[in-house]
Image (cartoon, grey):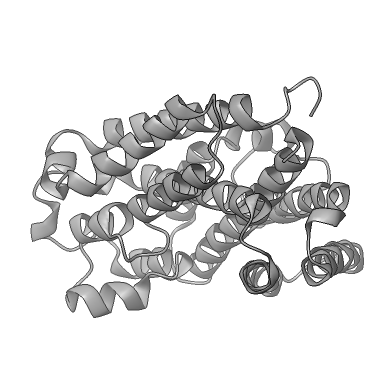
C-alpha cells in the first residue's frame, strides 16, 4: 500500500476516535454540571481534564476563566481550534476524501454526511447550541462509522491501518482520562469508596464501562477497581490492555522489512500490561505509570509514521 494512502486511513480513523472520545468527556462533564456541585468543584474537574488533554493553554488564550459553558463550546464547536470535535470531524472527512478509492461507498457516504450535518448543526445552533444533544449525536455517528467500517471493508491493509489508528488513539484517550483522576488512585484505594460516587459513575458511563463495572465487580465503585477495569481487563473494549493487543495484532498484519522494531515495541507494551498486576501498578506510582504509558504511545505513533506513513513535510 502507498504511504500516502496508509497515512490518510490512519489519521482518518484517529480523528474519528478522537471526536468520539472528546464527545464522551464533554457528555460526562455536562451531566456533572447539571448536578448541585459547587462552581469551584466543577471548575477544578474541568481544569484537570483539559490539562490531561493538553487543551488548557489553548483555552486560556481565548478565555479568562474556566466556565463550564465556555469549555463545552470550546471543546465541541470551536471552528478555529484544531483539537475541537468540529475540527476532528472536518479532518476525518478530508482524509477520507483523499482516499475514496480505498473506502467502501457506504463508509465514504457515512463520513461525508457526518461532516455535512455537523457543519449544518454548528451554523444552525451558533447562538445557543444544545451541547448534550450534540455530543450524543457525535457518539452515534462514530458508532455508525465504526460499524460500517467493520461491516463493509475487506480485511486488507486499508482495514488494518484504520484499526491501528482507532486503537492507538483510544489507548491515548483512556490513559489521559485516568490521568485527570489520578489523585484518587493511591495504595489501599480498593478499601474505600470514591469521594463522589456519582461523578465516577458518570465517568464510567462516558467510557461505556458502568454496566460492565457492575457486571464484573457487583460492588461499590472504588478507584482501584476502576483502574483495574480500564487498564488490565482484556475483555473491556476501551482498556489499555485491549487497545495495545489490537494495535499489536494489526501491526503484524501490515509488517514490512523496516517495521520489526515497531512491532516489537507494540508487543512489549501488550506483554507488559498482560503480565502485570494492578497492585504493582498502584504501589509503584500510578501517575508515573500513566506518564510512561503515554510516552510509549507517542513513541509508537512516531515509529508507525516513520515505517509506514508520509514524512511530515509531505503529509
Q: Nearer the viewer, residue 283 or 276?
A: 276
Q: Left or right: 79 with respect to 7?
A: right
Image label count: 0
Q: Left or right: 2 with respect to 27?
A: right
Which residue appears at 66% of the width and 45% of the height?
Answer: 10
Q: Left or right: 221 with respect to 26?
A: left
The image quarter in which residue 292 lies: top left
* Image quadrant occupied by the C terminus: top right
Q: Left or right: 189 with respect to 141?
A: left
Q: Judge whether residue 185 can be spotted in this image.
A: no
Q: Nearer the viewer, residue 6 or 154?
A: 154
Q: Is residue 59 depicted above or below 17 in this figure?
A: above
The image quarter in which residue 266 lies: top left
Which residue appears at 79% of the width and 47% of the height?
Answer: 91
* Image quadrant occupied by the N terminus: top right
Q: Is residue 266 depicted above or below 212 in this figure?
A: above
Q: Position of residue 291 (x, y in %)?
A: 36, 31
Q: Is residue 175 depicted above or below 124 in this figure?
A: above
Q: Position of residue 141 (x, y in %)?
A: 70, 71
The image quarter in which residue 238 lies: bottom left
Q: Nearer the viewer, residue 274 or 211?
A: 274
Which residue appears at 71% of the width and 53% of the height?
Answer: 85
Q: Judge whether residue 56 can be spotted in this image.
A: yes
Which residue appears at 12% of the width and 38% of the height?
Answer: 283
Seen as rendered, the residue at the extreme front is 257
Q: Position of residue 24 (x, y in %)?
A: 55, 62
Q: Position of residue 248 (x, y in %)?
A: 43, 45
Amino acid at each position: 500500500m502507498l504511504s500516502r494512502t496508509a497515512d490518510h486511513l490512519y489519521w482518518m480513523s484517529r480523528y474519528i476516535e478522537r471526536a468520539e472520545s472528546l464527545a464522551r468527556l464533554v457528555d460526562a462533564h455536562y451531566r456533572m454540571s447539571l448536578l448541585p456541585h459547587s462552581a469551584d468543584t466543577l471548575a477544578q474537574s474541568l481544569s484537570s481534564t483539559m490539562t490531561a488533554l493538553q487543551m488548557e493553554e489553548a483555552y486560556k488564550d481565548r478565555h479568562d476563566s474556566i466556565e463550564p459553558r465556555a469549555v463545552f463550546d470550546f471543546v465541541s464547536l470551536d471552528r478555529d481550534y484544531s483539537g475541537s470535535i468540529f475540527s476532528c470531524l472536518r479532518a476525518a472527512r478530508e482524509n477520507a476524501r483523499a482516499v475514496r478509492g480505498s473506502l467502501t461507498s457506504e463508509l465514504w457516504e457515512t463520513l461525508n454526511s457526518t461532516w455535512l450535518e455537523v457543519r449544518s448543526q454548528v451554523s444552525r445552533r451558533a447562538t445557543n447550541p444544545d451541547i448534550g444533544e450534540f455530543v450524543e449525536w457525535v457518539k452515534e455517528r462514530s458508532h455508525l462509522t465504526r460499524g460500517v467500517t467493520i461491516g463493509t471493508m475487506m480485511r486488507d491493509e486499508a482495514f488494518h491501518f484504520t484499526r491501528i489508528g482507532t486503537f492507538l488513539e483510544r489507548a491515548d484517550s483512556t490513559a489521559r482520562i485516568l490521568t485527570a483522576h489520578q489523585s484518587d488512585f493511591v495504595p489501599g484505594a480498593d478499601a474505600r469508596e470514591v469521594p463522589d460516587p456519582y461523578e465516577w459513575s458518570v465517568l464510567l458511563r462516558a467510557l461505556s464501562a458502568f454496566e460492565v463495572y457492575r457486571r464484573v465487580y457487583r460492588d461499590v465503585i472504588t478507584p482501584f477497581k476502576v483502574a483495574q477495569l480500564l487498564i488490565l481487563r482484556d475483555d473491556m473494549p476501551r482498556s489499555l490492555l485491549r487497545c495495545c493487543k489490537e494495535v499489536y495484532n494489526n501491526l503484524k498484519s501490515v509488517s514490512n522489512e523496516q517495521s520489526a522494531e515497531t512491532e516489537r515495541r507494540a508487543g512489549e507494551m501488550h506483554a507488559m500490561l498482560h503480565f502485570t498486576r494492578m497492585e504493582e501498578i498502584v504501589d509503584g506510582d500510578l501517575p508515573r505509570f500513566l506518564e510512561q504509558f503515554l510516552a510509549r504511545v507517542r513513541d509508537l505513533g512516531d515509529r508507525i509514521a516513520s515505517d509506514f506513513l508520509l514524512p511530515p513535510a509531505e503529509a
